[in-house]
């Protein structure tokens, strides 16, 4: 992936780590194989892509890494211990990479979405989880998020306007973390 990107564009300036899977499963019934799979996709993949892009960003004189975590790291949820652990690890990885790679002009930040209507968490339609209505009622903005709600903050973090922002864990949840 990195070689192909450099071959096509000549450099890597921005990495947007947004890999995730999740479904509710109690910790006591989760197998080690399930745990390892969640960690591999939700955390290890972000580490490996960051590590692979690092030398190219150094060659380019710097870069931006934007990790997509989850508000669950601030709240917890009993049937998502695997997801919370992986995304919590991402928060700390974000801050550690920011500290270690700042000298190379690489800014590393994370976005923590709340409830967002995606394939992984449908907020409308027949696959909607009953938890959605509860969360929407508690959220100060009174609605769930949409992917478009992240365009502005993502553009900011990918742009030179964020050259002095690094190691930040930015909550983008419509205020749900204030209410639950």
Image (cartoon, grey):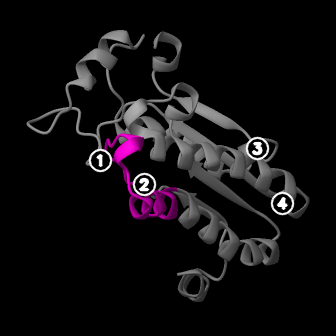
Residue 71 picture location, percent across and down: 51, 32
Q: Is residue 50 left or right of residue 122?
A: right
Q: Reading the chain from its start, which is encountered first: label 3 or label 2?
A: 2
Which residue sits at x=58%, y=89%?
7
From which residue to which does the magenta span run?
20-42
Residue 68: mark? none
Q: Reading the chain from its start, which is encountered first: label 2 or label 4?
A: 2
Asked whether residue 33 is drawn in magenta, I would say yes
Nearest-to-viewer mark from 3 and 1: 1
Residue 14 quadrant: bottom right
In this view, the residue in front, 154 or 53, is 53
Which residue sits at x=60%, y=70%?
49
Q: Reading the chain from its start, which is encountered first: label 3 or label 1?
A: 1
Residue 107 picture location, percent across and down: 76, 53
SS for callout 3: loop
Q: Rounded to the nearest whole Å, what is the CA distance between mark 1 and mark 2?
A: 8 Å
SS for callout 2: loop
Tag 1 near tag 2, CB within 8 Å? yes
In this view, the residue in front, 106 or 72, is 72
Tag 3 near tag 1, CB within 8 Å? no
Magenta segment's dominant SS is: helix
Residue 96 picture location, percent across and down: 79, 51
Q: Which residue is mark 4?
A: 101
Residue 20: mark? 2
Q: Reading the chain from its start, which is encountered first: label 4 or label 3?
A: 4
Q: Which residue is mark 3?
A: 167
Q: Reading the chain from its start, which is encountered first: label 1 or label 2?
A: 2
Above or below residue 105? Residue 159 is above
Q: Which residue is mark 1?
A: 120
Q: Rounded to the nearest whole Å, what is the CA distance between mark 4 and mark 3?
A: 10 Å
SS for callout 4: helix
Above or below residue 64? Residue 128 is above
């Amino acid at each position: 992936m990195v070689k192909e990107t450099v071959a096509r564009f000549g450099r890597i300036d921005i990495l947007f780590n947004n890999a995730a899977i999740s479904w509710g499963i109690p910790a006591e019934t989760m197998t080690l194989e399930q745990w390892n799979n969640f960690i591999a996709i939700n955390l290890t993949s972000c580490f490996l892509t960051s590590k692979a892009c690092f030398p190219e960003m150094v060659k380019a004189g710097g870069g931006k890494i934007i990790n997509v975590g989850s508000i669950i790291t601030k709240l917890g949820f009993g049937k998502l211990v695997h997801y919370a652990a992986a995304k919590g690890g991402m928060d700390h990885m974000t801050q550690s990479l920011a500290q270690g790679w700042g000298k190379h002009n690489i800014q590393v930040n994370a976005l923590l979405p709340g409830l967002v209507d995606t394939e992984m968490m449908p907020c409308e339609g027949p696959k909607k989880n009953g938890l959605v209505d509860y969360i929407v009622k508690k959220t100060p903005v009174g609605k769930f998020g949409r992917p478009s709600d992240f365009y502005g903050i993502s553009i900011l973090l990918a742009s030179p306007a964020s050259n002095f922002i690094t190691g930040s864990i930015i909550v983008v949840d419509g205020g749900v973390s204030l209410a639950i």
